[in-house]
Amino acid sequence: MTVQTIAVKPRGGKAEKAPVDAKKVVSGQPVTTTRNDFSNAKGKFHCGVWTATKGVWNVKYGEDEFIVLLAGKVKLTPTGGKAKTYKAGDAFVIPKGFVGTWETLEPIRKYYAIAQ
């Protein structure tokens, strides 16, 4: 097996834009864009760039996600737990099984790596 080099660029490339599912939205009218730059052959690992506008919505993670925030600010609140706020330059992991709310406080752009 050889190493595959993937050029992940903060801007450019084809991105899919969509509103957050209305059933999940708590407040606002958040819209996201996803530009997936790589998926492995088994479809269990993905990475790319994702953006979101302001809003709050419910989340339930069925995968582990590593995030590096490139711009903006987000607050994650686990159900029954304490909120944590992240800003541009922060890196963090949301583990499989996380349930709570995602609140985009300032429009964000992030690199993501997801393992299912």
Image (tube, helix red, strand yellow):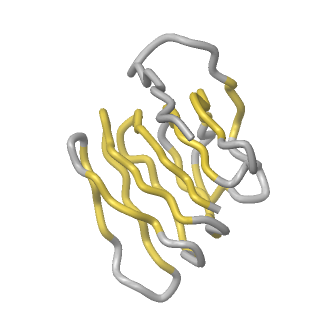
Taking the image as drawn, is residue 41 in sight?
Answer: yes
Image check: 36 left or right of 42? left
Which residue does the image show at 52% across and 35% down from the upper left? 2
Quadrant hosting residue 33: top right
Q: Name the residue rendered at 46%, 55% in the picture.
A: 103
Of the pair 83 and 114, the residue shown nearer to us: 114
| Quadrant in which the N terminus is drawn | top right
Image position of 42 (left or right of 72): right
Q: Nearer the viewer, residue 69 or 32?
A: 69
Measuring from the top left, give residue 23's x and y in whole percent.
Answer: 78, 57
Find the residue positioned furthest to the top.
12
Name the residue rendered at 65%, 39% in the picture. Answer: 39
Of the 4 image quadrants, the one containing the C terminus is: bottom right
- Residue furthest to the bottom in view is 80
Q: Nearer the viewer, residue 43 or 9?
A: 43
How many numbered callouts? 0
**Is 114 placed above or below 46 here?**
below
Q: Is residue 79 above or below residue 10?
A: below
Q: Residue furthest front?
A: 1
Q: Position of residue 97 (x, y in %)?
A: 59, 78
Seen at 64% across and 69% down, the residue is 60
* Residue 87 placement (x, y as % from top left): 25, 47
| Above/below status of 95 relative to 115 | below
Report whether residue 33 is seen: no
Residue 69 position by quadrant: top left
Q: Position of residue 50 (x, y in %)?
A: 52, 35
